[in-house]
Amino acid sequence: MAEHTNHVFGYKNNILVWIDLLILTFVTIEIAQFDFHDLTVVVALLVASAKTFLVGYFFMHLKFEKPWFRVMVGIMAFVFIAFLAFLFFDYSFR
């Protein structure tokens, strides 16, 4: 039988993560105002990746998962990044 433990974050931690997400949202809005030429999408995706990490790690409780599960999530993220890289590579030569 699997042992179940509650993983409760305090309000302080949730509020700090929420503030970080708000700051990153404002950074995303500011990035849209500037033209980084070919790097605009890359910079926006990096900020979105940071927000995704925060949501997954804290709100989806990946912090408390077993190491093999975190490895599987990492592999999935690597495959997703590889598909995006192939997409940008293909798009750049059309």
Image (cartoon, rainbow, N blue to C red):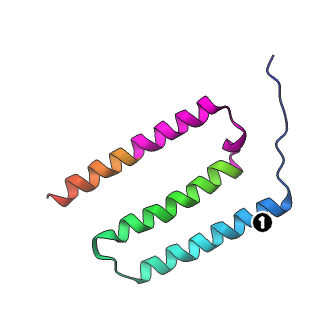
Q: Is residue 90 magenta?
A: no
Report the quarter where the C terminus lies. bottom left
Q: Is residue 1 left or right of residue 45?
A: right
Q: Residue lying farthest front? A: 67
Instruction: Using the image, determine if residue 94 lies above or below residue 60.
Output: below
Q: Name the residue carrying label 1.
A: 15
Q: Residue 78 in the image: state x and y as whole percent.
A: 43, 42
Residue for point 66% across, 68% down: 20
Which three-letter amino acid code belongs to the residue tagged 1?
Ile
Count of numbered circles in the view = 1
Q: Main secondary structure of the magenta part?
A: helix
Return the x and y of residue 22 as percentages of the image width and height: 64, 71
Q: Would residue 69 be counted in the magenta stretch?
A: yes
Residue 43 picture location, percent across and down:
41, 68
Residues packed near mark 1 inside 10 Å, few (<14), some (14 to 19) or many (20 plus): few
Residue visible at 82% across and 52% down in the picture = 9
Quick one: SS at disc 1? helix
- Specify start and end residues of the magenta stretch as a single range: 59-80
Q: Quadrant of residue 33?
A: bottom left
Q: Residue furthest top?
A: 1
Q: Is residue 21 above or below residue 7?
A: below
